[in-house]
Amino acid sequence: MAADAPVLSIGQLAARTGLAVSAIRFYETRKLIRPERSPGGQRRYRRSDIRRLSFVMAAQAFGFTIQQIETELAKLPEGRTPTKRDWTRISRDFRQSLDRRIAALTQLRERLDGCIGCGCLSLKSCQIYNAGDHANARGAGPRFILGDRDDQNGRGQ
């Protein structure tokens, strides 16, 4: 960090981001931010760390794991403030992931609408009914709602 670069203490960064100091330290251990130390040993953060931490909070709110966030932030440059181009690249990757999730959630919602609305009037088409537990061979959970096909009874995708 250049000697004249504006820096923040951990308390200032916490106040600016709304994060607890302990959360900032956690993100530091995960290498999402990399403060330098003052001659007295205190952490000093770049102003660009506000954006990094804001990105972390937004990504977590959208359901991304800390590992996914680490992978994306590792693509950003060290030692300089990320540019619009840097953030656009990451946002494009996240957008594709969000689009896939939205499609999967929409499909799940449609299956649940049919299931909830059926009132179990027809066990042959019920997405939850699993006579003889034969769906167990495909894994745990409501296999037909999750998208498995039951060719025997015409259920699922």
Image (tube, rainbow, N blue to C red):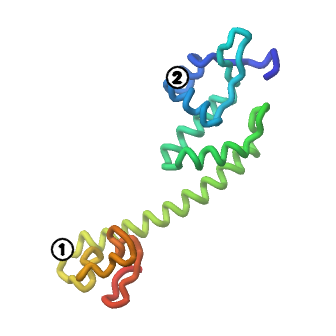
Which residue is label 2 attached to?
Answer: 21
Q: Residues within 10 Å of mark 2 (few under 14, many from 20)?
A: some
Q: Secondary structure at mark 1?
A: loop
Where residue 114 appears, x then y in whole percent?
29, 74
* Disc ID at residue 119: 1
Q: Is residue 66 above or below residue 5?
A: below
Identity, as a three-letter code, of the amino acid under mark 2: Val
Q: Residue at x 43, y 65 (%)?
A: 106
Q: Is residue 37 above or below residue 134?
A: above
Give the residue furthest to the bottom.
152
Asked if residue 3 lies left or right of residue 151, the reply is right
Q: Is residue 78 above or below residue 117?
A: above
Identity, as a three-letter code, of the amino acid under mark 1: Gly
Q: Residue at x 68, y 19 (%)?
A: 44
Q: Residue at x 64, y 36 (%)?
A: 32
Q: Secondary structure at mark 2?
A: helix
Give the residue furthest to the top.
40
Point out the image quarter for the N terminus: top right
